[in-house]
Amino acid sequence: PRSLLQTHRQCPPRGARTMRPTAWRQMAASVRGRPPPAMSLAAVRSQQWHVVDARGQHVGRLAARIAPVLVGKHKPIWEPHRHEHGDFIVVVNAGEVEFTGKKWAQKVYYRHSGYPGGLKRRTAAEMQRRKPGEVLRKAVLGMLPRNKLRRIFDSRLKIFAGETHPHHAQLAGLRAGWSPLEDIAPPGSLV
């Protein structure tokens, strides 16, 4: 008969069925005395800058294209707990986005001051008139994961109402390579 200790050793560790194969290999390597493989610095530093022209684009469709790039899901090295894989996105002409149907008048954004009776409401047209691009920012934020990384991803989204923006130096290296948003980039930004 086996002892309790021998039976325990043969059982897989807690959570083994839910672990990814790479995580299982890293854990097994660390148990055997070898350190787990470190992520390369090139993979960590591979954040790129993308520029997107929002003129004539529908808000939801554009936000659905931007959110995965902010998180970094377009890269083969993506991991859900790492924020280093997400790219920076500069959106120009955000004041000229479009909604379908009557959403400019019917879509309402709510916020609360925290005091009794402090519920504030604004239509999408008011939001766009007061702060162009905030409608697009709220749409993208609604598609990001609701965790501690959300603020980091939001800080990488740069939205501008017009064509001018201060990020020309960061976009200087944009000319070479593939971009997941190249079909909605402004003309002349990619060569």
Image (cartoon, rainbow, N blue to C red):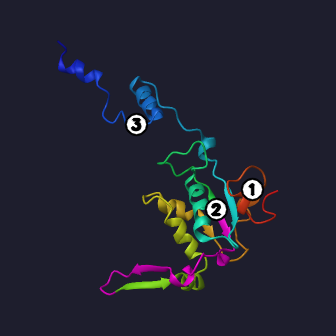
Q: Is residue 14 above or below residue 178?
A: above
Q: Amino acid at mark 3?
A: Met
In the image, the segment drawn in magenta is: 89-117
Residue at position x 47%, y 79% from top?
109
Q: Secondary structure at mark 3?
A: loop
Amino acid tagged 2: Ile
Q: Quadrant of residue 94?
A: bottom right
Query: Which residue is disc 1 drawn over?
Result: 174
The residue positioned 33% from the left and 80% from the top of the image is 114
Residue type beneath disc 1? Leu
Residue 167 in picture, x, y percent from top left: 70, 66
Q: Residue at the location (58% across, 61% down)? A: 64
Residue of label 3: 19
Residue that extends furthest to the top in the rendered view of this protein: 1
**Image quadrant where one finds the C terminus:** bottom right
- Position of 6 compared to 41: left or right? left
Q: Mark 2 highlights which residue?
A: 89
Other residues around mark 1 within 10 Å, as few (<14) / some (14–19) / many (≥20): some
Q: Is residue 27 above or below residue 182?
A: above
- What's the distance in space between the residues labelled 3 and 2, CA to CA? 32 Å
